[in-house]
Amino acid sequence: MSSKKILLIEDNTDDVLLTLRALQRANILNEVVVARDGVEGLDYLLCKGQYSGRNTDDTPVVVLLDLKMPRMGGLEFLQNVRAEDSLRFLPVVILTSSKEDKDICESYNLGANSYIQKPVDFDQFVQAIRTLGLYWLVLNVSPRGECES
């Protein structure tokens, strides 16, 4: 399980640290790559910019995506990811504090696989992360490569 990477796209340093701590507390020891906004996240996935030397076969198994970020927010990132044939099946889990109906609906309309509102209580957050990790890193089977329509 530890060879499966997680891409965390989050601009708030405190939320990054909280998420990393929750993953550790939930015994999810996978490598976590942190991108500070949608632009950096896309660069990572598409091996551009500072990630131009990255192995394209080393794609994360899941993206944990915040919505409200500078430069490129989560919804725009999601739209760009779903437009890329090589990434259209990549699991993207919205992990945000927003509970606005329009954010939830728009996330699913753009192809989010799941929407999780960050619990305020740390123990509840750890449990949410544990459940998320069990499902996306252990139970879920994602296609590798292209699927024919």
Image: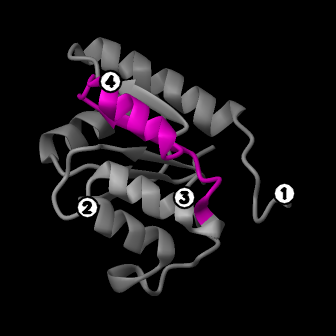
Please name which of the two marks, 1 or 2, marks the residue nearer to the observer.
1
Residue at point 70%, 31% (across, down): 139
Check the picture and name the quadrant holding the N terminus. Answer: top right
* Mark nearer the N terminus (2 vs 3): 2
Give the residue type that dot 2 points to: Met
Residue beneath disc 1: 149
Give the residue type that dot 3 points to: Arg
Residue beneath disc 4: 101
Residue beneath disc 3: 82
- In the depicted structure, whether residue 45 falls above or below residue 131: below
Residue at point 48%, 24% (across, down): 130
Distance from the alpha carbon under mark 3 to that under mark 1: 15 Å
Q: Are marks 3 and 4 in contact (CB under 8 Å)?
A: no
Residue at point 30%, 36% (across, down): 19
Residue beneath disc 2: 72
**27 vs 38, nearest the viewer:** 38
Residue 110 belongs to magenta span: yes
In this picture the colour scheme is one colour
Residue 10 belongs to magenta span: no
Give the residue type that dot 4 points to: Asp
Please name which of the two marks, 3 or 4, marks the residue nearer to the observer.
4
